[in-house]
Image: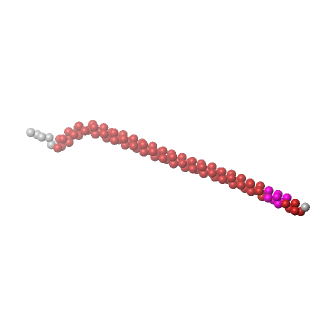
């Protein structure tokens, strides 16, 4: 009587499992592809968000700089007007005292 040895069992198992294991490997590959695409998509979203933040920050900084420049210009203008007003008031006082 010829009893099947351990190697015969392995060969038989390979024949039975071969289509299923190929299906499992195929499923694993598909899952890995999905995970890779998902991680790539997340990376792209992170980069887009980072770029958006940088652009927004730069835009806000540019607007703030422009606002401060305008405010400074207005302050210089007001200072000149106040100096002229002070000079005019001084001239009026001088004229009144001289009378």
Marks counted in the figure total 0
- Residue lying furthest left: 1
Q: Quadrant of residue 26?
A: top left
Q: Is residue 54 above or below residue 3?
A: below
Q: Is residue 72 covered in magenta?
A: no
Dominant secondary structure, magenta: helix
Chain part drawn in magenta:
84-92
Q: Quadrant of the C terminus?
A: bottom right
Q: Quadrant of residue 72?
A: bottom right
Residue at (57, 50) in percent of width and height: 57
In the rendered view, does 57 fall on the left or right side of 43? right
- Residue lying furthest right: 99
In the image, 8 versus 51, the foreground residue is 51
Residue at (20, 39) in percent of width and height: 12
Which coloring applies here? secondary structure
Residue at (37, 43) in percent of width and height: 32
Give the percent coordinates (x, y) of residue 63: 63, 49
Q: Is residue 85 covered in magenta?
A: yes
Q: Is residue 97 above or below residue 50?
A: below
Q: Quadrant of the N terminus?
A: top left
Give the percent coordinates (x, y) of residue 25: 31, 41
Give the percent coordinates (x, y) of residue 66: 65, 51
Give the percent coordinates (x, y) of residue 44: 47, 45
In the rendered view, does 99 fall on the left or right side of 26? right
Residue at (45, 43) in percent of width and height: 41
């Amino acid at each position: 009587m010829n009893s099947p040895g351990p190697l015969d069992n392995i060969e038989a198992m390979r024949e039975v499992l071969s289509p299923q294991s190929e299906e499992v490997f195929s499923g694993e590959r598909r899952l890995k592809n999905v995970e890779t695409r998902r991680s790539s998509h997340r990376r792209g979203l992170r980069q887009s968000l980072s770029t958006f933040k940088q652009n927004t920050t730069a835009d806000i900084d540019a607007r703030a700089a422009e606002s401060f420049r305008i405010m400074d210009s207005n302050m210089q203008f007001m200072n000149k007007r106040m100096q002229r007003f002070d000079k005019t008031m001084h001239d009026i006082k001088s004229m009144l005292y001289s009378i």
